[in-house]
Image: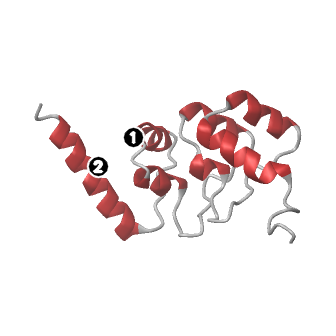
Amino acid sequence: MQKKYANLPLFFFSSHAASSYGHVNLLKYLITCGADVNLRDFDGDTPLHVCETREVAQILIDSGADTRALNGAGQSIFETALQEENHDMVEFLAEKGLNFMNNISFTTHTMETLEEEESDGDDG
């Protein structure tokens, strides 16, 4: 029996994993080897959708990542960061002017949730 994904290039998962787990040196190496920084996974996410640190995001952006790409759910990178409750990435993307929102109802709900969590933390 042949595996369903046996013919996918190694870069397919490697660039997403390196981005998601913050493996900066591996990501830089993959990019120098020709990894596509706009390659989509099975959810339509680009490496920029799954990255979790400013440093990785900046590397991807500097390497030509599409900052306006939408994933399979129609979410921008900003909306994905909101959904993941990654406050540092939300702040970074806003600072860069990349707080593009495609799914307004999702984004409004998520931002309200984040604001509630922040105000709850201030009560301490």
Residue 21, image x and y in percent? 60, 38
Residue sitting nearer the eye, 44 or 98: 44
Q: Is residue 49 visible?
A: yes
Residue 24 in the image: above or below residue 119 = above
Residue at 47% across, 49% down: 81
Which label sits on residue 20? none
Q: From the viewer's perspective, is 104 left or right of 55?
A: left
Q: Mark 2 sits on what residue? A: 114
Residue at 64% across, 65% down: 44
Asked which secondary structure carries label 1, the reply is: helix
Write down the quadrant of residue 7 in the picture: bottom right
Residue sitting nearer the eye, 14 or 103: 14
Asked which secondary structure carries label 2, the reply is: helix
- Type of amino acid at the residue the image marks with label 2: Leu
Q: Residue furthest front?
A: 1
Q: What is the distance, in whole Å, between disc 2 and disc 1 at their CAs?
A: 9 Å
- Type of amino acid at the residue the image marks with label 1: His
Residue 44 in the image: above or below residue 59 = below
Residue 28, image x and y in percent? 77, 32
